[in-house]
Amino acid sequence: MRSGERSVRARLRDHVAASDPGLLRLSAGLRTVGSLALTLAGLALLGADVSQLVAGAVAAMVATFAIREKRRDRQAVTLAAGLPVALVSVTLGALLNSRVVLGDVFFVVLIFGAVYSRRFGERGTALGLIGFQIYFLSLFVSATVPALPKLYVTIAVAFVASAVVRFVLVPETPERVLDRLRQAFRARFARLVSAQLELLDAGPDDIEKALGHLRGGTARLHDTAMMIQGQLEDGTSDEAVARQVQRRVADAEVAAERLGLLLLTARSTERADTLTLHLPGAPAPSGGGTLVREEETDTLRRDLAALRMLVLRPVSGDPGTAPAHVRNRLLGYRDEENLPSASPAVQDVFRGIGEAARAVLGLRTALDGPQDESDDTPSTTRSREELDAEDAAIAGAEKSEAEREVSTGLNRPTTRAAVQVAVGSALAIVGGEFLSDQRWYWAVLTCWIVFLNTTSTGEIVVKGSRRLVGTVLGVVAGIGLAALVGHHTWPAFALVLVCVFAMFYTAPLSYTLMSFFVTAALGVLYTLLHTYSMSVLVLRVEETALGAACGVIAAAVVLPVGTDRRTDELLVTVLDRLGEMTDAAVGQLSGGAADDLLDKSRDLDQALADLRAAALPLTHPITPLRTRRNTAQYVVALLETCAYHTRTLAAAAELLPTHPSIAADPRLRRAGRRVVHNIATIAAHVADEDATTEVEVETGPSIASLLGPDVTPRYGRITGRVLRHLQRLDEAVVGLARPLGVPVATPATPAGKG
């Protein structure tokens, strides 16, 4: 029974870790709700009235969510500095409350300063946010000068409560977050293996569903890997350990993704379909055929289940001989003599399982320390020796400094955003006061919010539309909740706490859901303030629509950054990073000097993430330009394919210094030159579409044919494996040229001669 209970708890823990990596959403929700509850309890003991309770709840929320720094000491300094900022802001709000014109002008100036302060990093962003939100609070509760002493006490209690919850009740450290992200990575790795098992067993009617699970699992594993990279600097004091963890996580991600693609290739009766088959939007294999025999399926099913067990097995558990036997069997697939008799495609899957098992071994060593080696076979010992050699090479490597371009003047993003928000807010104030001289500030708040974490006009349109939809749905919910609680204070605040938790828990997943819960909570707060009515909630929708429109107008007219311009800039960045990484990886594979491929991989991943976010207006379902949407989705999908194959080349390149059995192949430099040239050609075309000199993307014989007839005997299997990824990368890059309008040369028409 106890063993069963532990198993259930372990599965539940793995499920939570996989669905909420690092428990970041859960922690944010609990921290905010805890701050609110503690603030309300403290104010109730002081005999505060309902207006103070509402003000305290809002102030506690602001003091909690505004601070995003990772180190606790920096959080404490920012929270301490935020209190005087909040007190000054509420004082000015009360003083200017009756001076309409002067108050409006100051509000616009405050908004400009709050946005401009983002250029000073996380602390500047937090203090600007606190100043704006507390001034908004003074408008919400109609603060007056006689009420200031009570508001000072209320805000002070809220900040103290926020500090107690942040540093005592729900403490958060970078080290703890990193540890939970490691657990989440394991859980998501195991879920991806489960999706691969599902794909293996899927019939013709289930193939699309299985592919969807595989794509989603691959994307979520990548997201968790990126989150770990973001926490390594603060979560690990030893730089060598941080680099080792970064390397092992990257290896595991590449191995898991490669295994999925190999399984897809073995299942597909049309090999050409697998170029982008693992990416969202790609069609399922026609006919649902398979090249895998039944007995091979049984063995693959057994070994994939064993791999999943190795990923999830806790290091503190009883090691026993069974897990060691399973690990040794899977690692044995890295040796040709241990591969089962099967077709080449199926043998590649077994090799992929062996490489994934090696990645799991390296991941466990990096995260949990040295492992028991008493039951190692020669294959396992060799894998450990390779990992130890790689770790030694990582420890001795010097980290290079990245160069940063610094924008100045109005080209600086913070300056441009500050001007845009100030103009949009001025429009929102004027328009909002036409709708209501009491609730106009909702339009200003919406205008402010749609500019948060957005750059282009298209991003602002999408965010504004989501906020409007969430607000409309929240109004409907607010009507029901207000009728449910009436004027019962504490049941109403209990509902507010539930809505606040849901708001912060769902915020990273859906901005529409977050807006829904915010509006639903406001309906309850208006009831407590005795200002609730149907007309007030309808006005909330009108002000929200007005604020979103003012934000879009300001973004489109004042120092505009069009979606096309923004995505083109980021596309060039992605192509530049892709070209740099490909050139460095191929250079190292051909015998050149070692480069810092891990950092280049991280830069490429971040550039791709930025491009995906910026391209959202082009790929959003509401866009009326269907052809443009399909093109954007296709380009992003091909870039994901290029990134995967480049990461795999980099992983192979980093094996060379520590694996004597693998030799560099100088011929790869010549084979990779065409790929690097084509990437640079496409980047140059996107950066300057009006260029008079037309340069074409080169095509020609296959990459393998560029090496000559003798490929494997002299240099071993590594050349054959690298060539497959280099060939796929070459095909994907040429595929990018067509939708981007770059001329493609044919073998009969040499590049540059047309």
Image: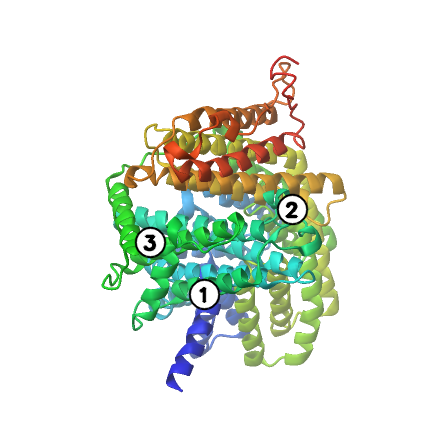
Residue wearing tag 3: 362
Amino acid at the residue labelled 1: Ala
Q: Secondary structure at mark 2?
A: loop
- Amino acid on which the number 3 mark rests in the picture: Gly
Q: Is residue 536 toward the left or the right of residue 175 in the image?
A: right
The crowd level at tag 2 (other Cα within 10 Å; few <14, some 14-19, many 20+) is: some
Judged from the image, the secondary structure of the residue bearing numbered disc 3 is: helix
* Residue 253 or residue 465, whichever sits in front: 253
How far apart are labels 1 and 2 at the CA level?
A: 37 Å
Q: Amino acid at mark 2?
A: Glu
Circles 3 and 1: CB distance less than 8 Å? no
Residue 17: mark: 1
Snapshot colouring: rainbow
Image coordinates of residue 179 in percent, x first then y, are 35, 60
Earlier-in-chain disc, 3 versus 2: 2
State which quadrant residue 45 falls in.
Answer: bottom left
Quarter-of-image position of residue 381: bottom left
Say above or below: 632 vs 680. Answer: below
Q: Which mark is residue 270?
A: 2
Q: Residue at x 64, y 24 (%)?
A: 744
Which tag, 1 or 2, sits closer to the chain's start? 1
- The x and y percentages for residue 453 are 54, 46
| Label 1 secondary element | helix
Q: Please name whichever residue, 525 or 413, is drawn nearer the observer in this view of the structure.
A: 413
Q: Is residue 81 above or below residue 151?
A: above
